[in-house]
Image (cartoon, rainbow, N blue to C red):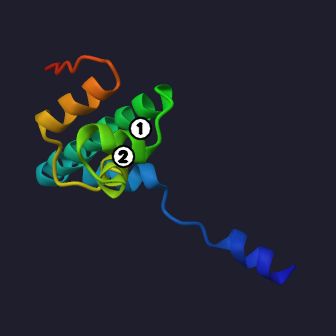
Amino acid sequence: MKSSKKRNQFRGIPHESVLQKELKDPEFRKQYQREGVKLAIAYKIAELRQKCGMTQSELAGKIGATQSQVARMESANTSNFEIKTLQKIASAAGKELQIKFV
C-alpha cells in the first residue's frame, strides 16, 4: 500500500503544458510541424497498404524497395519522402498521388 501512495504523491508536468511552452520557440515549432507532416504521410502509407490487403513485403516488391524500407516509411523513420516513391506507392495501390497546399 505504501508504494501506491507514493505513486500518487508525485505527479509529472502535463504534456500539453510543456508542449505549449516549447511551441513558443519558432525553431521547435517548425521542427514539430515537420515531424507532424512526416507522421501523417507515414500513417497514410500504412493505411493505404492495409486497405489494399498488402503486406509490407508485397508493397516493397511492387515499388522496388525492401520490406525494411517500407517499415521505415510507415514509422516516419526517414529524413524525407521522395515524390517518386510516393507515386510508386500510389500506383501499386491503384491510386493517384495528389499533393495539396493548404
Whether residue 62 sits left or right of residue 9 in the image: it is: left
Residue at image position (36%, 32%) is 44
Label 2: which residue? 74
Q: Quadrant of residue 86?
A: top left
* Residue 42 in sight in this render: no
Looking at the rendered structure, the kind of residue marked 1 is Ala
Looking at the rendered structure, the kind of residue marked 2 is Glu
Instruction: Of the two numbered discs 1 and 2 on the same chain, state the one appearing first in sequence.
Output: 1
Residue at image position (24%, 17%) is 96
Label 1: which residue? 46
Quadrant for the C terminus, please: top left
Asked whether 29 or 71 is in front, the reply is: 71
Q: Secondary structure at mark 1?
A: helix
Confirm or deny contact between disc 1 and disc 2 (CB under 8 A): yes
Is the residue 40 above or below the residue 8 in the image? above
Which percent across, then down, holds residue 47?
A: 44, 32
Residue at image position (23%, 44%) is 64
